[in-house]
Every structure is written in C-alpha cells, then in structure tokens.
Image (cartoon, coloured by chain):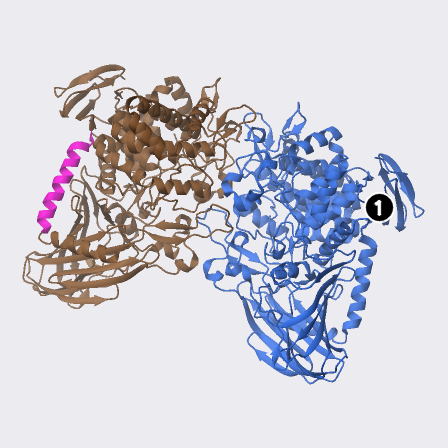
Chain colours: A brown, B blue
Amino acid sequence: MHLFKTSEKYFQVHPWLVVEEGFDPQKQRLAESIFSLANEFMCVRGYFEEGYSGDHLLGSYFSQLYETLEVKYPQIFKGFVTEVAAMITAVDWLYTRITLDGETLDLATAQFSDFKRTLDLRDATLTREFIWTTGSQKQLKLTFIRFVDLQMTALGCQRIVLEPLNFSGEVHICSGLDFNTIYELAAGWDQTQGTGASKQQMAQTNFWTCERQQCVDDLHAIQARTQTSGCHLFSSFRVAADQPITPRLIEREKFIGIELTLNVQAQHATVFEKMAVNHWEQTADADQVWTNGLQLAQQLAEVTFDQALAEHRRGWTDFWNRMDIEIEGDPELQQGVRYSLFVLYVNYHGESERRNVLCKLGGEVYSGVNFWDTEIYCHRMYMFLDPKIARKLLMYRYHYLPKAIQNAQRVDLEGARYPFSTITGLEDSGTWQHVDLEIHQNEAIYYAIWHYAHVCQDKEFLYHEGIEMLLQMCRCMASWGGWSPKNGDFGFYGVMGPDEFHMMVNHNCYTNYLGKKMFNYTLEVLAEMQRDAPELYQQAVTKVQLRPEEPREWQRMAEKMRILKDEETGIYEQHDGYFDLPHIEVKDIPMSQIPIYKHWAYIRIFRYNMLKQPDFLNLPYFFSQDFTMEEKRQNYEFYEARTSHESSLSPSLHAILAAELGKLAEAYNFLAYAARLDLDNYNRNTEQGIHSSSAAGVWASMVSGFGGLRTDAETLIFNPTIPEQWNAYRFKIFYRGALLAVHVTHDKALFKVVEGHSVTVSIYGQSHRITPEGLEVQLLQ
Amino acid sequence: MHLFKTSEKYFQVHPWLVVEEGFDPQKQRLAESIFSLANEFMCVRGYFEEGYSGDHLLGSYFSQLYETLEVKYPQIFKGFVTEVAAMITAVDWLYTRITLDGETLDLATAQFSDFKRTLDLRDATLTREFIWTTGSQKQLKLTFIRFVDLQMTALGCQRIVLEPLNFSGEVHICSGLDFNTIYELAAGWDQTQGTGASKQQMAQTNFWTCERQQCVDDLHAIQARTQTSGCHLFSSFRVAADQPITPRLIEREKFIGIELTLNVQAQHATVFEKMAVNHWEQTADADQVWTNGLQLAQQLAEVTFDQALAEHRRGWTDFWNRMDIEIEGDPELQQGVRYSLFVLYVNYHGESERRNVLCKLGGEVYSGVNFWDTEIYCHRMYMFLDPKIARKLLMYRYHYLPKAIQNAQRVDLEGARYPFSTITGLEDSGTWQHVDLEIHQNEAIYYAIWHYAHVCQDKEFLYHEGIEMLLQMCRCMASWGGWSPKNGDFGFYGVMGPDEFHMMVNHNCYTNYLGKKMFNYTLEVLAEMQRDAPELYQQAVTKVQLRPEEPREWQRMAEKMRILKDEETGIYEQHDGYFDLPHIEVKDIPMSQIPIYKHWAYIRIFRYNMLKQPDFLNLPYFFSQDFTMEEKRQNYEFYEARTSHESSLSPSLHAILAAELGKLAEAYNFLAYAARLDLDNYNRNTEQGIHSSSAAGVWASMVSGFGGLRTDAETLIFNPTIPEQWNAYRFKIFYRGALLAVHVTHDKALFKVVEGHSVTVSIYGQSHRITPEGLEVQLLQ
C-alpha cells in the first residue's frame, strides 16, 4: 500500500476530547472545521463568536437551505445544468462583541494567554477559554461554551463566563443576530472547488435581504431571505445573566442585537447566556416562516441553558451507549474513531426525512450537497444504529422522485435519474463530465433499498415507496443502456464509474454489475408482490405506468449484462479496455505530484490504468457471497496496486477487504489513515470542512473490517479479527430488535445481546443464536 | 446517403452574381453573411451602411484582431484554459447617414422600392440599389457600391450614387468612423455557440476605448484600443464628390465624422465617395500604430475610388484566370462553386504569413479562430493556386511554434502542441473536451508540411522550419501516447477524433494512423537531411535539443502503432471498441431530431455508433495509394451509413470518395449540398457567417472528386469522371511551375499546360507528359 499522505499533528490525543492548546492563527481554519458543531438542522464552525479580524471562515449553515447560482460553461450543450444550488453561510447567531476599557476583544490583535479550545465528543459541546490582558493591563479570563441542541434542533446555546483576575468593573457586551455574513466561494476563494458561480455573482458575497425584524419583550427576532432561491430564515435570541441586565436594542442593516453592561468582580465568574432559536421551512410564504418561527421561539422561551444542556447530554449519552466503538491500547485511533462517529451523528440523526447527510460538514466546499456517499457509505451505519433513520434517508429520496424523473428528462432518459450532487432534488452541480456520466447514483439507491429491506425486513416500505423508486430507476437505466452489435450483450456505454480517473468508458464493471443486480432485484420484488401483495403490486405498476414489455426487457438486460472478467487471472476488468491502458507504477509517483488532481493536467489523468478508487472492489464487499476468497484476493491485490487513493472514500474500503484477506497490518494502516483523516489533516484540506463519508467508512472499517460484518446472506455474518496494535475493541449494532454487543480480544470474540431479544448470526461460517447471556468464540487467526 | 438537409432558396441563380431582389427583413442576417466582403486583412458583412434599425448584425472585422475574454467553468481543473480570444466587431468605417427633408433614411421604416443587392463574384464588389420615397413623396434612387481592396488591403472603398427622380434639392450626408459597435456574442445572443464570456463581460457589448482622434486637412482619423488584449486599431477616411463640398467635423464618443450637404438634380446622378484606410499591427505601442496608420493613409491619399477599383479588378481577374471552375449545364452548382472559391480567396490570399483562414467568415460565431480546417481543407487549394500562399500558411504555424510549446506544457506534454482553435497561437477555446482531447491538429500540420514539401518540392522550407515543427510535434505526440500492457503496441489513449461524436476513446484510427505517418516522415526527413544537408540537420537537432533516444523511440512507436482493422470485413475500426457500440440506424432518425446537437442531450450522442463525420475516411483520400479500391469501397459504405453529416466538413469528403468509387450520383448530391451550403442556407445558420472550410471542400470535391486528383504518388494522379447532370467542366491547377488546365466532357478529358513548362502527371494509371499543346484522353466510365 502507498497512501502518499502525511499527518499534520495539531490536536491533543484524548479518548473523548479534541483539544487545541495554545492558538496558532495559521491553523484557525483547520480548527474551525474540526470544532464544528451540528445537529442535522444547523451547523456552526468553531469560529470565534466575539469577532476575529484574522483569516478565518465564519460558517453558519442550515441543512438544505440554499441559494441558486447560475452556472457558466465555455460552451453550453443540450442538457447541461444551467443553475446550481449551494448551501450559503447564513445568520451568525453567536454574534458577540466584548469591550473592556474601550478595547473590543479580537484575538488577532489582543494580548492573551492560556488559550484552550476543547470539543467534548461525549456531549458535543465546544468550550474555549483564555485570559485576555487589555492595553490597560486588566486581565479577564473568558470561557465560551456552545452547543446546538440535539433534540430541540432549532436551539443554539451560548454561554460566556467572564472572570476578572485583577480588577472589578464594567464589561460591555453586544450580542445579536447578524446576516452580514460572507459566502466565500462566491468571491472565488477556491476556484478549484467552486460551484461555478458566474462572475457577477462572484463579486457578491452576501445573498441575504432582510425582511423583518422585531423586538417583543426580551425576544429579538429577524428574518431574511435568500436572493434567488427565496428561502426565508427566521432567527431570534434571548439573553440572560446572573445579574440584573438592561439591554439596549441595536438595529443595523441585516442585524438585530442588544448592548448591555455587566458588572464583573475580581476573582468572581459572571455568566452571560444567549439562547438562539432559528427556524426555516421550505415555503415561499415569508409570513408563515415568521409566524412559526416566533411561535417556536416562544415555546422555547422558558428553556434555560442548563436545562437544554442536560437534555442534550442525555441524547448524546444514548447515542454513545448504542454506537460507541472502544479500542483498547490505541489512543490515537480511539480518538479518531470516536471523532468519526461524532461527525456522522451531528451531521444527521434522523430528525427529518427532508434532510440528508452533508457530504462535507462545516464548510462551503461541496456546497452542502449529498452524493451517492449517503447510500453507499453512511446508510449502513444508520441502519445498524436505528432502522428508522435508515428508512428516513430512503424516504428523502422518495420525496424527490418527481425531481429525479425531471432530472432524467433533462438528459433524454426515461424514468428517474437521481442526481449525483444535490440539495434541491435536481442536479445541483454543473460538472457534467462527472455528474452526468456517473450513472451509479440510481444503483447506490437500489443498493440501500435492497440492503435496508433485506437486513431490516421492512416490506411496508419496500412494497410502497421502495418498489416505485426501483421501477422508475430501472426504467432509467434501461433507457441509458445499449446492446452490443458485436456480442449481443447489454451494458452501459459512455459512463464514468465511481473511479473518476476514467471518464467516458463502456461496461464499467461496477455499474454493469449493480445494474444487473438492480434489474434482478426489482423483478424479484415484483414477483414477490404479485404473489404476496397483489393489490400493492397493482398499485405500484399502475402508478408508474409500467409497460408490459418492460420487465421482460429488464430480465433480458440482466441476463445479458456484460461483466468483464479475465478467466485466466480471475481479475474483473474495471471497464472495457481497462487492461489495455498504459501502466503507471503508482507507488513510483513522486510525492511532489501528489495530489494528482492538483499536479496533473486534468486530461492526462484519464489515459492510464491508475485509479482514484477501485470501484470494482466495492462489489466483493457489498456482495461478499458472490465472490470466492481467491477472487477477492486476486482482485484486491491487482487493483490496490493501481490505486492512488485520491478519493477519501478509498482507504476504508481497502481496510475492510484487507481485514477479510488477513492482511491485518495493511487494514490497520488504511483504517489509521481514515480515522484521523481530518484530525491529522492528511489531505491538507480539512479547513474546507470535514469528510463525512470517510467518517462513515471508519465505522465500516471497524465493524465490517475487523469485525468482519457482512450483510448479503440470510443472517448477518461476522468474521472478527484484531490487529496486533490493539488489546481489544468493542462495538454494538442494532439488528432486528436486538442491540448486539461485540467484544474482540486477541484470543476470543464475545457476542452478547444487551437490549432486546436474541438473534441468529453467523460467526466464522457457523450459525449461532446470540442471547443476553452472550456467546464466546475463539478468534481465528 | 441521407443528408437530412433542405435548401432555403432566397438568392437568384446566376453564373457570376449573387442577387437579392426585393428585401425580406427576415433574411437580413442571412443576406448580410452572404454579401460579406473581405480581403484577408478586413471583412465587412453586407449590412446597410446608412443605418438600419431592424434586426441585423453590423459586422466589421479585422483578421487576428481580438479581445481577451475570461472563461468560466462549473469546476476548473488543472490545465484548463482560463482566457480565450475572440475577434470582436471593430470600427464601422462604412458609417453613413442620409437625410432628406429632415427624414433620415432607415430601410426598417422608410418607404422604398426596386431593392436589389448584388454581389459580383468577378470583382468582389457589392452593389445595392433602391428607390427611396420620403414622407414628402420625394423619390431618390440610391446606389451603394463597396469593396475592400484586394491589393491595398488597408483600403475600404464606398461609393454612393444619388439620383433624384422627381425633385432637385439638398441631401444631407453624415459619414464617419464609428467605434460604437456591438459584439453580440458578449451579450449572450447565441449562448449555444458562445465563447463563454463571463456574465460581467456579457453585460458589456462594446470593448473599445478611444485613444485619439484628429482631423488633418481632409483626412479624418481615429484610433481605439481593445480593453483587455490591448490591440490598437487606426481608422481614417476621406470623402470626395463630383461637386464642391464643405464638410463640417463631427466628433462624438468613439466617433469621428463629417456632415455635408449635396445639391442633387432631378434625373441626374450625384456621386459621393468615401475612402477609408484602416491599420493595425501586433504591438502595444499606440503611437507606433497611429504614426504608421497616418503614414499609410497619406500614402493612399491620392488613390481614387475608380483607380482602386481598376487595380482591385485586375487582381480578381488574375485569380479567376487561374482558379475558376466552370461547369456547363448546371447554373446552380456553377454559382455555388464560384461562390465557394470567392469565399476562400476573400478570406485569405497570402498577403501575410501572420494571418490565416478564418474558419467562419463574416460573423462572430467561432470567434475568428482557425482550426485544423486550414491544413486539412484549405491548404491544398492554396497550394494548387500558388505554392507561396501554401508556404505562408505553414509559416503562420511556424511563427507560433513557441506558443505551441507553451500550449503543450499547459497540459503536461512535451514539445509543441498546436492549439485546436486559435487566434493568439495559444488555445483560445475553453471547450476542453474538444480542444484538449482532439490531438489531431499537430497531425494536420504534419500532413500539410508533408503535402506541401512533397508536391511543391520545397526542401528549403522543409529543412529549416518544417523539420523544426515536425520534431517538436513528434515529441508532443510521443509524450501523449502510451504502450499497451496487453499487446505491447502503441497508440494514443483518451482522445477525441475529428468525429466529435465519440469523446474520450483509445486508438482512434485516424489519429493513430496519422501519428504513425508523422513519426515515419519525420524520421525520413531526418535521415535525408543527415545525408544531404548535414549542417542543417545539425542545426535542427541542436535547436530542438533532440535527445538521441527520441528518434529510436519514435521509430518503435511508428512500428508498433495500433491500427485497428477487421480483416474479415476489411473495415478499419474507428477506435477501440467502436464495433461494439450500440447501433443507430441514422437514416431512421426523424427530421425533428436534426440537427442532433440541438435535439439530443450532449452526453447521449456519445453512446452510439453514429458519427458526426467519419474521420477514418480521410485516410484513403489523403493516402490513396495505401488502400485498395475494395478497402475504400468497404469502408466508405460502412461508415457513410453511420454518418449524420452533422459536420459541414463531411459532405465534401464523401463527394470525393463517392466519385472515386464510381458512385457519381451520390458524389453529385454531396457536392450539390456543399456547394450551396450557405447560398441555400442548408444548415440554417448562415446568418452566423460563411462556412469557409466547407467552401474549400467544394474545390476538393470538384478537383479531387470528379477530377480525381490524388497527390500521394510521385506525380499527380488524375482519374476524371463527370456526373450526368453536366455537359462539361473545367478547372486549373498550378503544379511545379505549370498552370495546368483540365477540361472534362462526357467522352474525353483534355489536359493542357496554359502557362509555364510541361509537367508529368498520371491519368487513369498511365504517366503522361502534359505540354502547352495539350493531351486528350478518353473518359473512363
């Protein structure tokens, strides 16, 4: 293996905390990303709420809240996407200014010491403390604590503790809600990752128009709308302190706030709290948003910081009780794995089926969209946490089925084509060579439907929403595919596989294979419904207006699907002609050319057999029973040697397969990289946000990798292994009503139901009933 | 054959004239294109110089004079072109306003009759006449005559004849030079063909800043510069009339002009003339342009309209004496063929080796760039008109060799990569999937070098500039190419062939074949020089720093070049996997889906075996001796059936091969289409400009098609045929010092040297010495 990546150690290692001690302004953007907090509804980067004039990215986002941007091409062709959507930065509800002796705190210019920023993974709180020494030599110790409430997701909570060390006197505070925020990508900050906003829009960095602001009693509210997409965002706040306060209203453009004076006593901690309630909904009705926002704010008016925190902590404790993965003897990986789980859960926890997992958390890059990553990387973790969440993610897609049909028509296809990169349900990226040629998104959704229905046995979903999506997606794939006049077989021509290093190829093995599976599964479900649920069958085929010949055609397409394989070597060919591509010895590429995307001309990448990620290798993981161990080994070794791992999704897949093949040291290295991808800034782009899908891959590397979980048989399969670096590890999964705990040491694996009834699983090929008493098996080496 | 195209008859048929009688405002843009005049240096569309408020495109262009525009992508990757160049519309030097009784003439609103616009192909003059009836019922017959001087190319000449029919009195004229011209593409007029100007630039339509204006005696001069590229354009004019005049100076923003009053007499023609001198040169020195422009204007000050016209006519008479193609018995094709020859010669006639053939004449679309079309389509016609012109076109490329080296580096290549679409010598288009993946431009230049050196025997050029280009271009191709790990052979991966309906393919037969030819030819020239001109050899290899291993590598690449062919059917495979592509019955595509580019989603086009143009079929034309007649027939029939002819270049190639294969009716139909492509507006886009390269293809369809000229043997080869529609046809070519006239009737072909000494050619496989006495051969049927 050759990962070409080097770590950049900055944060302290701790099993449950991520700590920055001392402040390096160069790392501010990195730390802001790492210290992002989110609760599915909203997200804030770890920026300094008191204002900071140094380089930073004040990021405050609301999932699915987007602005529409026009997209430009050098030359536009039929079917090109003409406008895209991007999650823009929204209200700075943490806005605070602190003034002492006429000096307003700004860590870019102020004198300060004992700086420490701590993210507590246990309860998703961010604490920052330091001692500020003013020009007049007054020393004020400040502690900022914030969290975004896990249950009452509209609620953002901020506490500031002010403790004068060498004086008593007045501190002036200004606190408010600020819509004067900057969407940096629009200013062309990083064009290589941009959304393609046109120049006119580029010149502009704020897309908010204030609609209304109001102060009722101690509740301050403001509402603004985005310019083109017309999203309305309501924001309100209240403040409290442990001393009487008399706030004065401040109104500025796109801003509402208050000013007040605190009397602080030497050696005594004064507490100031701000409770913000944010609200938005998908409607063009500004009044409705305002009314509902206000109502919500009033409902939450009595909730104190401490009450909210206590409830929030309970939620997080529940989560960790169900999902924590413990590793003994490896603090770095322990921290990395927990950080990964944290990242997933803050990103999405199933509150709403109109939201999804943002593929990058806490940044502007990737524009707040979701990708196939949700279904291929994230969905399984949620499924084993709580099937209801997995169902919600599928329902998210179901709600956008009409949009997917529209998206198919855009490129002359029938049925439903789910977009590759989306907020709005339509294709929200203009990079046509990727988003339009990669057609495996439908297949990823098929996979998640099958996976969920198979593991969680939810026929209700399958026979209603699932079948409708499957039928429309099959119809789409059939309209893309073509018949070879040479061999008479079928396949998908002119596609890009998930390995994005080959642009327009025929018979991409991953795409063809999943297409075949999807046709077959859909036909199976149809047959099953015809037999077991004839009314629902009739309802489904009527709704999609299934033509009688379609199932026959799909059957023939599945039968005749070309799956390229060299029978002599056992290697499946990634696409037609892949074996013929000039060879590059990936391990010999000098570090100076890494990452490839930045150092190689784009068009050069596509001429060789080097992979970004080996898409074929997903198949022996998804469908473990379809491949022999020998095939897995042959293909893993062949493709791994040709992989640049330029995709952050690649290492975790390798960890999983390497573990299965007994290459434990290799599996460990891949996992080690994935688990600390952002904490150690391996890709040097964590400043842009956190790689959520890689984090989901970390869960899979643990559970499917070392735990050996496979899901494509009748019951779950486990083949636990353990790398030599660890003493033991533990994880839990929720499976058919049981919370199953697995504890693996170097000599044995203990399986135990810790909640719910007993379940049957297969361990090392033997079927076992796991009960609350537990079952111990010897570890196979 | 299936051309899917229908003609739109508008202009009158005449052997030497193109006539519009009566005015249809709907056809104004079309007629403006058709009535474009040019002289290589400048070009004006046939717009109404007196001002016209109806829909039209006031186009005044100067070859190579461009503005730089930023180009935007949805997502930018390494190597993408970030700014492009476009020939913007420049000074309206024909600017005139005519006022009678306070009414200013505007054919969009005025009452008029007897409208006639006539392009005389014999002398490239445009005449327009009509009778204007004012609101006060005065009738004024106006005749406008214009030409752009063929020899004194700075000179634009305008004559206006005013003949009152029913009154005597005063007519007011304003005449000037106007830089307030609009570049429509910048306003997004036709986005599907645009240059990708960014939104900010889109809002702007004029890119000129006035630098200086001055009136010295009767010479009025103005100079303006483009905003970003910094081109300086000097323009000046003088007026004259057949009565004493007293012009008054008019100065406005970006405008200089005069006003004067003419006393006109009933039934008497008054003549008013304007002689404009325009000048620009590639320099950032505004003063230099001004000084040289002024000097030139003063030099040309004494030239009258009639003197200039007489000299201009002599030049055109010379051209037609050498290049006319006569067809007996087919007035429509006669006109179309002559119009095509006219289009080429106005476009470029070899005045400067810093100019080239504009691929579209008299319009904004294609931005005034040149393509591979120059070398593949146009170069041969110039070569047989005058080898010096052909040499100049090659020297144009030679001058840009340093830019081609820079252009190679942009996409990680060695040596020189000539741009696909260029004004500046660099790549001036951002449509990366075409311009960066189509690598056959170098090969087109190799082909033209070889063709020219072979036919014209110019070792001087070959051993100096030719070899240097060849070496740098081979180096580039070698750095793109790759070795198959499967077969051990060589080829070009990840390319787009000239058939632009397959985007990123391997081993495109056209590209590989020409690459092999280019390597071999370069090595031959090297060997020849080493033997015959060792000093020049040393000079060349030193200059390009040829590495000793390079020729050996190129030799091996040529030897091992993969040329895909099905030995059973004799069909060369257009690219690896082409035979495997799903079949489309091109002839069954409904008319409503034509043109494909407008009706099919872009990405859909690439999944089938349908071709835009069959690039392979160029090879049996270029290298006729390399293929048997049977191979030609097999491949023609195979590929023609799969061709959509969506490229305007396609029909003429088919005419040439069809004629060779004895499919004379088919050849005739292809020629008929190509010859009247613009006159009959077959593609419904002539309003955007004239298809120059198709016009060059018309020459080839006549001379290489029915004339059967082939150039790849030791001497020229002729295999004359004649379609049944004609009585006879005649053409001339200049070949090794002799002007050779060919006259073909249904029973015989007469070959005769009409200028110069005798030459040897092959006719129907027999070698013949052609003398001034001539030689008659029986026509083979």
Q: Is residue B400 left or right of residue A568?
A: right
Q: Is residue A677 visible?
A: no
Q: Nearer the viewer, residue B590 or A72?
A: B590
Q: Nearer the viewer, residue B94 or B72?
A: B94
- Callout 1: 10 Å neighbours few (<14), some, many (20+)? many
Q: For the stretch drawn in magenta, what is the main secondary structure?
A: helix
In which quarter of the view is residue B582 placed?
top right
In the image, what residue type sits under mark 1? Answer: Ala
**Quarter of the image where the N terminus of chain A is located:** top left
Q: Position of residue B406 (x, y in %)?
A: 57, 50
Q: Is residue A681 magenta?
A: no
The answer to whether residue B241 is left or right of residue B81 is: right
Placement of the C terminus of chain A among the 4 image quadrants:
top left
Residue at image point 28% right, 37% down? A395
| Start-end of magenta stretch | A303-328
The residue that label 1 is drawn on is B728
